[in-house]
Image (cartoon, rainbow, N blue to C red):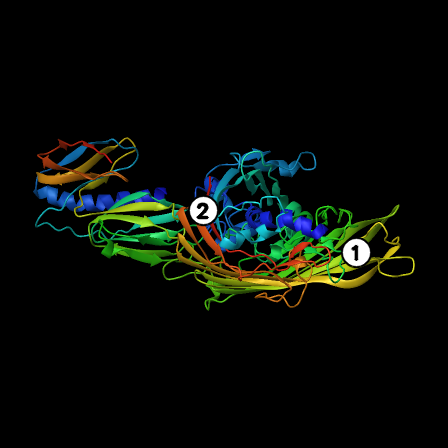
Amino acid sequence: MRVNKWLRIVLPGSVLILPLCLLFVSTKAHAIPVFSRKYQTSCTTCHLDFPKLNDFGKAFKDAGFKFPQDDETFVKQAPTLLGAAAQKDVFPHSVWPGEIPGMPPIGLRMNSFFQITGNNRNRFNVLAEPGTAPQVIPRTDFQTGLFSIFMAGNFGSDIAFWVDADLNVGGSNSAGGLGDAYLRFVNIGRFLKLPKDSLSFRVGQFELDLPFTQARNINLSSYDIFAQANIGAATGAQQNVANQFTMADAAKGVEVSGGHNYGGYHYSFAVFNQNTSGLDQTESPFVPSATGFASDSSFKNVYARFAYRFNLERNSESRKAVQAAGTTGPHDHTFLNLGTFYLRGKSQQALVSGSNVLYAREPYYRAGGDFSFNYRTFNLFGVYMYGRDDNQLPVDANGDLIELPLGSDSPAAVKFVSALPAKFNGGFLEADYLIHPWLMAIGRWDVVHSSADRINGLALSPDTPFFAPFTSTRSRFTPGIQFLIRPNIKASFEYQIRPRQFVTVVTDPVTGAVTAVNPFRVNTALFGLEFVY
Amino acid sequence: MNRHINRAVDLALTALLACALQAAVLPAGTLSGKVAGVKGVSVVYIDAIPGKTFPAPAEKVVVDQKGLVFHPHVVAVLAGSTVQFLNSDKVAHNIFWPSVGGNKKMSHNLGTWPTGEKREFKFDTPGFVPLLCNVHPEMSAFILVAPTPYFALTDEEGNYKIANVPDGQYTASAWHEGMKVQSKPAKVPGDAALDFSLTK
């Protein structure tokens, strides 16, 4: 009954809201006008189709937001010195000198969207409570996106910084949030006489070193696999998992890294807070009602990534350079990048049973591999990821499982035992082709299979007429095209094609409750217009 | 940068020397004046003289790329001259031009080359050559390939002086980046003055 009520209220709205939410979380900070001003150079020096970095942009980022060589000769806005360089000679009797950008390194970004939603958006109307009007999901909708500020640069001595924050999300009176905010100490390995760029250190809040950035990718919508939380389903096989963590989340912690993203090896290792909060037990039909708030910050997760990029030019000099040489000018390398990543963490859920509060501490991990192949302006890349959360179920004093959700007559829980884990897997495959320097064509396939997805929790019956297996929660093909109207102004379009699904509504012969047993999917066309300055 | 300016001066002197030989026989004067309506360097030159050809100097002009900027930004050479293109930056550059004198069929891409090396090109066809870098689209420079050795770059205030112009009736033109070329009849009976006022 509880599930049905929730469905009637939330699900129809989520059809529209979910894509928009994904939209808003998917793209945080973009190209950096700060650097255009500092170096008096175009966005395209570092970006193909902003915010996608070209090889030079990757080298610039690796170097701590500096030109890889002779940076000072390119700077057109002189920095403000925080002490003369000669002060180094009298250290420790003086503060080690540094510098700040001569002008406040501020960039701003604004975007807005228009969405067209497919016809079957209103199929859940039948679930409206008798006597109530179904929620209207508009076929077309204008949406204000983000107004963001971002600052980045270098304090000299290889200390880089980045801060971005969404000042406004989705229109007036909507509070935004902090994106990345970190200091990065570049090439600290020099103090240990390690090879150049083999060791850097980052501290603050940052996007994990994902194979392909979620926060700064060119797509209007997120990579589904990186936005996948792991929420247990109470229906059918009992699950007591409410891990809200997604790979796209900003992590608070520290990271060491080394190597380069434009050739050769690259690694990173991060330790960060498990700082997600689980669903309130009153808000989700799929997390057992006795489950309270989930994870706290007392756990530290670890994330590691290793990748190797093979630049494939025959000429060794060109192969090792930041950009490949060509007959008509330098360009991105032809390369094959192979990588792998692993995350291990622990999620916690509280269970209130009588006067006791028990805590289920559920280790989880995410592991995956990725590749990227580039030939001139054609880039094919993809990720596969597998996720697994331990599933701790409550048992009574006799060691018997307590059926979830807890009721008033449920026996008192005394501890947890491990049960079938909550798992998911999936990934994406994307092809980007820069037809002209101002025109990018994109094709992308996203798929997520989950045994414990909140939407999938609607239908665990194996005989549902889904296009995809019943454990498939999301799969879609998303062709898109993007136009650079100016180097800092972009118009984007994408069409999210989801396998056609039908909502089947059944009535419980005993309770009379109406239930939707199929996931709801709808095609969506999204238009975006954004500018940075 | 001074090195390149000196070379440009040497080139101009060489051209003027050739003209001086002519002037030893023919009376010559100085055409001078001011280019108004613009800020920065302009070019004033005497258009092609029917029946006259001029040997190109052997000296080469250097156009450098340093700090994501072309140096110099404007350079003038006599048709048939060779220009050396240098990359002094520790980043990759490219040089190409989409046209010569507005003729897009004469576009050319010099490609890319390592830091410190030079690449040359001989400009035979008179006209303005806009230089671009396909890696850094904000970079630009201009070469005037002049049909005669009678040309000069203005100073920052727009003043110019073309010496040793043989007496005669010519057409003089003034060019400035982003402005319309203005052409005027120039009568050189000894020293003469000719001012220009450029508009967009």
Q: Residue under circle 2?
A: A43
Q: Nearer the viewer, residue B185 or A488?
A: A488
The answer to which image quadrant residue A521 occupies is: bottom right
Tag on residue A365? none
Q: Residue at x 84, y 49 (%)?
A: A408
Q: Seen in the image, is B98 located left or right of residue A212? A: left
Q: Residue under circle 1?
A: A404
Q: Looking at the image, is mark 2 or mark 1 earlier in the sequence? A: 2
Q: Nearer the viewer, mark 2 or mark 1?
A: 1
> Can marks 2 and 1 be said to lie on one chain?
yes
Element under disc 2:
helix
Identified by mark 2, the residue type is: Cys
Q: Seen in the image, is A411 located left or right of residue A80? A: right
Q: Seen in the image, is A348 located left or right of residue A31? A: right
Identified by mark 1, the residue type is: Leu
Q: Nearer the viewer, residue A208 or A73?
A: A208
Q: Chain of mark 2?
A: A
